[in-house]
Image (tube, helix red, strand yellow):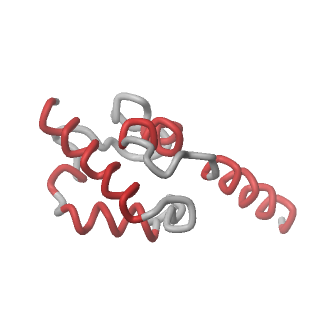
Amino acid sequence: MRKAIALLVMIVATGCSTNLADDASGPEIYSALCSRCHSSDLSGGIGPSLGAGSDLAEQPDSYVTQTISAGLGRMPAFRFNLSEPQIERVVEYLRAQQAAG
């Protein structure tokens, strides 16, 4: 059981680490870190949908920022991988996609 938990932690940590440029755009960050679970079109998969009409679209930006930073449920915290400006760019990207959808 402990080996299975350790393996799961390693997989999640590996999936969440990347060498993004400090000035990476919201779409670049989303593609590198979020699309594996939320899909490239924000329709969901392992994680919930993030697009227009989703529960997330109804939440304030502060909630989205906090969720990305600290994690929620099975979603890992990205505060160790992303700077505050990078997280802000992801939120801006999500909002733009939600408005377009």
The quarter in which the C terminus is drawn is top left
* Figure label count: 0
The residue drawn where x is 24% and y is 53% is 56
Question: Is 95 positioned to the left or the right of 26 in the image?
Answer: left
The quarter in which the N terminus is drawn is bottom right
Whole-percent x, y for residue 59 in the image: 18, 60
The residue drawn where x is 34% and y is 35% is 42
The residue drawn where x is 39% and y is 65% is 84
The residue drawn where x is 22% and y is 52% is 55
Query: Which residue is the extreme one toward the right?
Result: 3
| Camera-nearest residue between 101 and 19 | 19
The answer to which image quadrant residue 67 occupies is bottom left
Question: Is 18 positioned to the left or the right of 54 in the image?
Answer: right
Whole-percent x, y for residue 37 in the image: 50, 42
Question: Is 66 positioned to the left or the right of 100 in the image?
Answer: right
Whole-percent x, y for residue 81 in the image: 56, 60
Q: In this view, does 52 lie above or below 2?
A: above
| Camera-nearest residue between 17 and 4 | 17
